[in-house]
């Protein structure tokens, strides 16, 4: 068993999709997507916030290697991470919103706490 969800995509496509989802999530602080995508996005986004809490140059470069926009990284280090300085994990929250009309996929809203 793999330690992650494959989401029906090849490795490069899955990685690109998750980079895009995490970047968008950290940019807006909230997103609506399917349950499985949200769970994978949450896992990576929480790691990025934990790295940003360290605040050093190495952590910034590690986040920049994954997140696609420098402005989002700047916001993550300057605004988001300090907000969670006293919190040990659990930076996100998921609300189920019911099935999607087209294919019945379970939809959720993922947001920063």
Image (cartoon, rainbow, N blue to C red):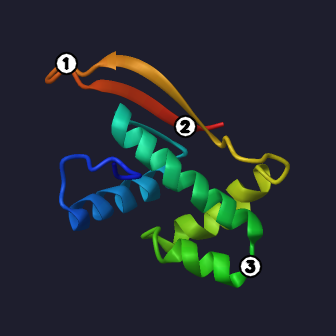
Q: With 97 as the anchor, is 63 left or right in this view?
A: right
Q: Residue at x 15, y 24 (%)?
A: 103
The percent coordinates of residue 40 (x first, y second) are 42, 47
Q: Given this view, does label 1 or label 3 mark the residue nearer the observer? A: 3
Q: Is residue 26 visible?
A: no
Q: CA distance from mark 2 to mark 3?
A: 25 Å
The percent coordinates of residue 10 (x first, y second) are 18, 60
The percent coordinates of residue 18 (x first, y second) are 36, 56
Question: Please, is residue 37 above or below residue 48 in the view?
Answer: above
Residue 56: assigned label:
3
Comes first in the chain, label 1 or label 3: 3
Residue labelled with disc 2: 111
Q: With 54 as the anchor, is 12 left or right in this view?
A: left
Mark 1: few, some, or many residues within 10 Å (few <14, many ≥20)?
Answer: few
Residue labelled with disc 1: 101
Comes first in the chain, label 2 or label 1: 1
Locate residue 73: give its quadrant. Answer: bottom right
Q: With 97 as the anchor, is 58 left or right in this view?
A: right
- The front one of 52 and 1 is 1
Question: Please, is residue 92 above or below residue 101 in the view?
Answer: below
């Amino acid at each position: 068993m793999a330690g992650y969800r494959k989401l029906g995509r090849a490795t490069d496509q899955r990685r690109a999709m998750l980079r895009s989802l995490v970047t968008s999530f950290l940019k807006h602080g909230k997103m609506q997507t399917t349950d499985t995508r949200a769970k994978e996005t949450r896992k990576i986004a929480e790691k990025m916030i934990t790295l940003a809490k360290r605040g050093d140059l190495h952590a910034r470069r590690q986040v920049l290697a994954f997140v696609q926009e420098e402005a989002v990284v700047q916001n993550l280090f300057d605004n988001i991470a300090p907000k969670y300085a006293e919190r040990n994990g659990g930076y996100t929250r998921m609300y189920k919103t019911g099935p999607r009309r087209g294919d019945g996929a379970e939809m959720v809203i993922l947001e920063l706490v």
